[in-house]
Image (cartoon, rainbow, N blue to C red):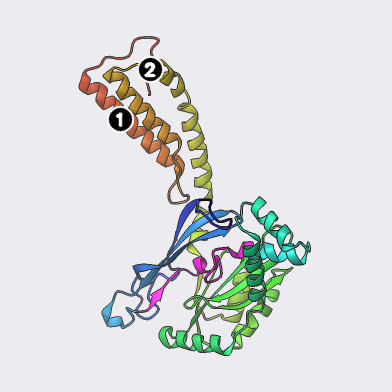
Amino acid sequence: MPLPKNRIVPEKKIYYRAEIENCPDCGRKLKRHHTAWKKNIATLQGVIQVWNMAYHCPDESCGNTKRYFNSAQAGALCMKHTSYGFDVLALVGELRFKHHLTIGEITKELNERGVATSERNSMRLYERYLTLLRASVTEQVRLELERVVQVNKGIMLSMDGVQPEKGNETLYVVREVFSGLILSAKNLKSGSAPELQTLLQPVKELGFPVIGLVSDGQHSIRLAMEAMWPEAPYQYCQYHYLKDIAKPVVDIDRKLKTGIKKSLRGIREIEKQIEKETSAEAEIAKDYLAAVRSILLEDGNPPLDLPGIRIFENAQAVQQSLENSLAKKGAHAPEKGSQNLQ
């Protein structure tokens, strides 16, 4: 049975933890409690499975063990109840209003970019884009924010900018972290701090206490948010921060991965030599060759799980196992002209 056109299958998993690491009341380090949510999200860079982990204060005497913190950056990837990233929505809006494409043409463009969708689903994405631009604080939203303040003694704000293609407008979205509510959104040609302050002004006028600010490393966003709420604690998104500082390591690891794979390409000649052999030794050698083949398919999830390091460690394990097997058998060094896996 064929899969629906808008069925998305993740290429990798990303785990997000709360940007706030310590309890705002007692200062104790927050502890992971449960998975707030997980879902597959289609972005312009591929499909990812996002896990948003919920943390809480473990100190019973603090009295806030039922208050949970999760990642603002994970929530900023897409709208609630959707599986498509804000970058996809921004592209849909750009294709419709700037390039005047029909829904059918938008569907074709998205599929060509690797975003699986159907015409019916593209229409939903277009409607969500319009909903996003109309985001405002209704009476229902205000009541929800009041409940957030009662539980958390204030609201926490995050801001993120999504640009589907360089040189085009950027879609900026302001969210309340605890509730996930979108408080403001707008396409801007300029991402300067004064422009962003204009977008934040209606949120400031709500008058709710702000207990925290979260964003990525974009300097103008930080300047704008700090200018509006200078006393509120500010936190960079840890995932982006770690990704940026680990970039040199990831680049070196990529070279390591390429070098190891090059050194293992000669195994095909060994496979040809023993493919028709049926001895016990040949069968063991085939198992080792299969293990080496599996190493070539290894991949990681940088920056915390580096593929080059993983391949190196697994190759070392296979080599050590082979050396142990030869030692147990009392094998001598291979005769001149023969090959081995090392």
Q: Which residue is mark 1?
A: 320
Between residue 223 and residue 1, name the one nearer to us. 1
Q: Which residue is mark 2?
A: 274
Between residue 82 and residue 327, name the one nearer to us. 82
Which residue is found at the position 78% from the left and 64% from the top?
A: 100
Disc 2 marks a residue whose amino acid type is Ile
Residue 236 seen: no
Asked if 291 appears above or below 242 in the picture, the reply is above
Locate residue 191, reporting x and y percent.
Answer: 69, 68
Badge 1 crowding class, 10 Å Cα cut-off, few under 14, some 14 to 19, many 20 or more, is few
Asked if 67 appears above or below 241 in the picture, the reply is below
**Residue 164 sits inside the magenta stretch:** no
Asked if 217 appears above or below 249 in the picture, the reply is below
Locate residue 49, reporting x and y percent.
Answer: 47, 58
Locate residue 35, reporting x and y percent.
Answer: 38, 66
Disc 1 marks a residue whose amino acid type is Gln
**Residue 75 sits inside the magenta stretch:** yes
Between residue 248 and residue 240, name the one nearer to us. 240
In-image side of 154 versus 32 (left or right): right
- Report the span colored magenta: 67-88
